[in-house]
Amino acid sequence: MREFGYQCADDVTGAVTLLAADPDARYLGGGTNLVDLMKAGVERPGLLVDVRELPLGRIEPTADGGLRIGATVTNSDLAVHPEVRRHYPALTQALLAGASGQLRNMATVGGNLLQRTRCGYFTDLSQPCNKRNPGSGCPAVAGEHHNHAVLGASDHCVAVHPSDMGVALTAFDAVVSYESADGPGEIPITDFYLPVGDSPHRETALPPGALITHVTLPAAPVARSRYRKVRERASYAFAIGSVAAALTVEDGRVREARLALGAVASRPWRARAAEAVLTGAPADGATFAAAADAELAAARPLPHNGYKVTLMRNLVVSVLTELAGEDAR
Ligand SMILES: Cc1cc2nc3c(=O)[nH]c(=O)nc-3n(C[C@H](O)[C@H](O)[C@H](O)COP(=O)(O)OP(=O)(O)OC[C@H]3O[C@@H](n4cnc5c(N)ncnc54)[C@H](O)[C@@H]3O)c2cc1C
Ligand code: SF4
């Protein structure tokens, strides 16, 4: 591992200034992803700027009924916050479905959004990988890709984003706020992750050296919400497919629907085509299947991950059916 410096930042401007002055510096949240990548030699920062003492550890109500979540709030604290549990249950469920209790106690909101893919080639320095080493190739396309993307990928990279939390935040239209050397800014989470295209090493729309300061949730939809994750073992595993959904049903018809899919694309995938089919339609199995099919029509599976298309169709139908049943009670 490369030798590195360590500095604990105590104000946001100071942290951003340190990163602006040193392109080899990285922010350190809980370190649960960055430190692993440093051990593997994928990340080789010269300086770690620890952000956990910054005044970004609060969850506060906003004037319009939403929540403002500091970037250093841990995944554990966010999951059990009473307002999150009451108004954004899919977010609590997504957080608790991720990693382990110990990891969630360390992992921060900012770090979770910026965690890197779990594609095995990405962390294997003996292999080419366009994301780690631009232009070197993508061995996953013809190699091991059973848990790779079926939506929105390109020949340059077929990796998926691993965050559970990000899928729920996407369904709830969260907005990511940051501070950079050029001042503050904000990005809707649906625009936060860049399309893969031919530059998979460019993952987010954050300016270089920007510090995530908050994530804001707009007022919760009236709808009930749910997160369901499918994984290869019952605990402590990344998703092979997941769904965050919120649904309001009135007089047997869908008044409002929010749907995001996880582990199918390089980003949490907002299912707009499915939402368009759902809105105003009868809240029944035929509509839910049509909605899933509308979204998955764009799927381009590889030889060994076609199962994900069926899995996601079943998952979407099952979660929506469950939510509609609860709404009718
Ligand atoms: C064994 C294991 C199992 C896991 N299982 C799951 C799972 O099932 N589901 C899931 O979603 N996740 C899972 N994870 C991933 C885990 O959720 C992430 O590692 C964690 O959320 C990252 O947060 P962190 O604060 O530790 O980030 P760090 O490792 O500290 O940082 C990650 C990245 O974010 C950057 N960063 C951190 N904070 C900021 C900030 N405020 N502004 C700008 N950049 C910042 C860092 O520079 C780094 O590039 C698992 C991890 C492990 C090790
Ligand atoms: S899928 Fe992406 S991360 Fe994996 S080897 Fe290909 S370029 Fe690298």
Image (cartoon, rainbow, N blue to C red):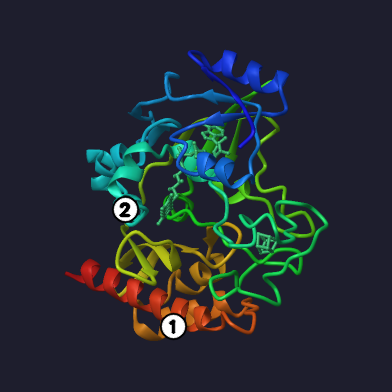
Which amino acid type is shown beneath numbered disc 1? Ala
Up-down relation of residue 293 to residue 251 (above or below): below
Q: Is mark 2 within 8 Å of ligand 1?
A: no
Q: Quadrant of the N terminus?
A: top right
Q: Nearer the viewer, residue 209 or 90?
A: 209
- Residue positioned most to the right: 135
Residue type pointed to by label 2 = Val
The residue beneath circle 2 is 222
Q: Residue at x 29, y 52 (%)?
A: 89
Residue 94 appears at what percent x and percent y? 35, 55
Indicate the quadrant containing the C terminus: top left, top right, bottom left or bottom right. bottom left
Binning the other alpha carbons within 10 Å of mark 2 as few (below 14), some (14 to 19) or many (20 upward) gives few
Q: How far apart, in angstroms, are the residues tagged by discs 2 and 1?
A: 23 Å
In the rendered image, is residue 182 in sight?
A: no
Q: Is residue 29 left or right of residue 304?
A: left
Q: Residue at x 30, y 75 (%)?
A: 252
289 vs 293, left or right, is: left
Residue 72 on image: x %, y %: 42, 30
